[in-house]
Image: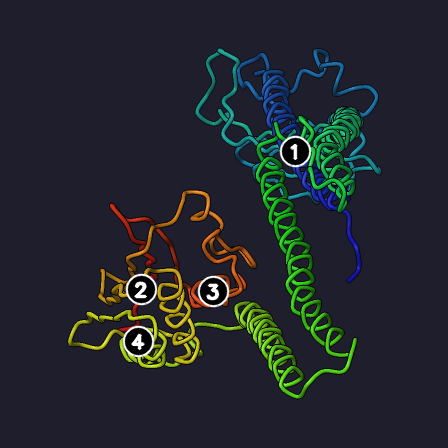
Amino acid sequence: MALFSIKRRVVGALVATELVLVVSLLLLTASVMRSQAIRSFDTALRGRALSVAALVRYSEGPHPELMFDSSHLSHEATEGAADLFHIETQDGRVLAMSQPPDSEWMSAPKDGVWDFSSRGRPYRGVCLRNVPVLDSEEESPEVPTSLQVVYAGSTQEMNSSLNRGFLGILVGGVLLLAISIYASVRVIEKGLYPLSELAQSAGEISTKDWTLKVPNSAASVTEIAPLASALSKMVNRLHVTFQQQRDFTTNAAHELRTPVAILKSTLQSLLQEPRSSEVYRSGISDALADLARLEMLLHSMLRLARADQQSHTRTGPDHPRVDIVGTCEAAIASLSPLAKSRGATISFIAPSEPLHVRAEPEDLEIVWANLIENAIRHGPSDSEIKVSAERKDSFVSVTVVDGGNGISSVDITKMFDRFYRGDQSRSRASGGYGLGLAITKIFVEGYGGSISASSLTPCGTRIAVAFPVSD
């Protein structure tokens, strides 16, 4: 998988966003500036047109006529990029026209406001109709009283001003964009620095030091603090797993060493000097007993490894629906001879209706057999082991209660650890290796259940197992 940089992606997205924002603001500003400039230009253009119309006078004499007084013509209409104008009466008689006439100007549409070019210069024109003659002299009915004024002014200066303004805004926008990008990059680098420190701290974890030293810069960041907490929990779980594997290896070596040493000692004693057949038979029987115990240990270790592997690969919906009551009855039946040999009795209390869960029936029988066998071996002779199954809301609960001396608070916290055995089970006669309850816990939790132990008053131990019910 190709690597990618979060910093580059964030910076790229930020630059793209700011660039779009700046371009949009520039275009909007340019549009507003041009609209305002054109509106102001049109207002000024109409004012000039009216000022030119005001130069129309009535002539002296008995028959007054309209005439144009060019002596008062404004500066804008006579020099430089001269304004263009065309004044005619309502009957179509031309009173005044800018000189010299221009074909492009004359062919332009004389209606409203429009843009055109004249002699290579941009112009904007306006047409005013029914403009009254401002001369107050009495006129005869035959003399026209309103005018049509067409006036145009060069927009070259306005366009140049707009271009300069837009260029200034563009330069300012680019500078602000550059400053913003630089500041954003610095902020992003500073924001990602705690993550870099956390990664460096995580890289220092080893089998000799499992402590994740979360830097204060990472712990104080809202977005990174959950990651630091999750990493700390993960490292702690890895430490516990590593310690369990190391303890398992040490305990397994210790447990294997004892029967092997006893078996070796027995065989060596038989070889030291000639002995009778009865002595050889007795020694071989002891050796076979030690081999049987060694075989039982290896079988328990293999079952533990298989249960541990299955707990990581199994999925609930793939398992069959099994009646938990039937598996309890099968486990009780298989352990009845052992209970009878120790004078113990096993009672089972179960509801009349089936209690279904999702699990493999063989695994459930191993769970109940381990719990009941543990109660038989560590309980007093002639005791009663009570097994009960019932439904509690959305769970099926199975409890195993014995009449022993109970479990200390230390043993309760460690009784499900691998190879852990309380003081009462340290003898070889008990036959335990401290793996049965560990196997039981793996099976129970692998099927989504839970297991717990508690001491009863005045004596006895209660182990409760709960599985999600499957209706």
Q: Earlier in the sequence, mark 4 or mark 1?
A: 1
Specify the farthest residue to the left.
352
Picture disc at residue 177: none
Please tell me whether residue 277 is drawn above or below residue 73 in the rendered image.
below
Quadrant containing the N terminus in the rendered view:
bottom right
Q: Is residue 350 left or right of residue 435?
A: left
**Position of residue 266 measured from the top left corner of the image (x, y, whole percent):** 69, 73
Quarter of the image where one finds residue 358: bottom left
Q: Which of marks 2 and 4 precedes in the sequence?
A: 4
Residue located beneath label 2 in the image: 381
Left or right of 210, for residue 141: left
* Mark in the foreground, 3 or 1: 3
CA–CA distance in space, label 2 to label 3: 13 Å
Of 363 and 162, nearer the camera is 363
Q: Which mark is residue 25?
A: 1
Find numbered disc 2 in the image and state the secondary structure of the residue it sits on: loop
> Of tags 4 and 1, which is closer to the observer?
4
Alpha-carbon neighbours of circle 2 within 10 Å: few (<14), some, or many (≥20)?
Answer: some
Q: What residue would you read off at disc 3?
A: 430
Q: CA distance from mark 4 to mark 1?
A: 92 Å
Label 3 vs label 1: CA separation? 86 Å
Position of 109 relative to 272 (above/below)? above
Circle 4 is placed at which residue position? 340
Above or below: residue 423 compared with residue 210: below
**Could one spot residue 157 in this view of the protein?**
no
| First reached walking from the N terminus: tag 3 or tag 4 | 4
Name which residue type carries label 3: Ser
Task: Please tell me which residue is depicted at 70% across the width and 33% down the height of the picture.
Answer: 213
- The amino acid on which the numbered mark 2 sits, given as a three-letter code, is Ser
Asked if the residues shown at circle 4 and circle 2 are in contact, with their CB atoms under 8 angstroms apart, the answer is no
Mark 2–mark 1 CB contact (< 8 Å) = no
